[in-house]
Amino acid sequence: MKRENGVLVQEEIKGVKKMRGEHEEQIKRVLDAVKSRNIENVFFVACGGSMAALSFGDYFFTKETELPSFVYTSNEFIHRNPKSLGENSLITDHPFNGWFDSAL
């Protein structure tokens, strides 16, 4: 980000506000979708640094909800085939490169 005397340049501030608005809309759509389903458990699937980022989600679910949550590496998730995984499971993955199609 461009700074002048430690202050963000006005155009950078506009970009941050726009991005925040886009994320708020995405988060709202996800929450609406989750609320419309009877979620029974949550799976966080990733590897390496991405897995570390998702571990906070597991911590939050464990501390703040009664929903069981699990953290798996992508390889573990595929080969373990968790028995509790079903149509009422919520899976959140975090592919290494940030592209959804690489996780499929």
Image: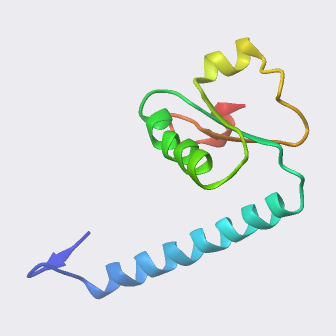
- Left or right: 44 in relation to 18: right
Q: Which sits in the foreground, 90 or 65?
A: 65
- Find residue 13 and report its image quarter: bottom left
How many marks the image carries: the answer is 0
- Find residue 79 and report its image quarter: top right
Picture residue at 83% right of the left edge, 43% below the top:
40
Residue at the far left in the pictured view: 5
The colour scheme used here is rainbow
Picture residue at 42% right of the left edge, 77% below the top:
15
Q: Which percent across, then down, holds residue 65?
A: 67, 53
Residue at the far top in the pictured view: 79
Q: Which percent across, then down, holds residue 99?
A: 59, 42
- Left or right: 66 in relation to 5: right
On screen, residue 85 above or below 99: above
Residue at the far bottom in the pictured view: 10
Q: Which percent across, then down, holds residue 59?
A: 52, 44
| Quarter containing the C terminus | top right
| Quarter containing the N terminus | bottom left
Picture residue at 72% right of the left edge, 13% below the top:
80
On screen, residue 31 above or below 81: below
Q: Which sits in the foreground, 69 or 25?
A: 69
Q: Which sits in the foreground, 61 or 79?
A: 61
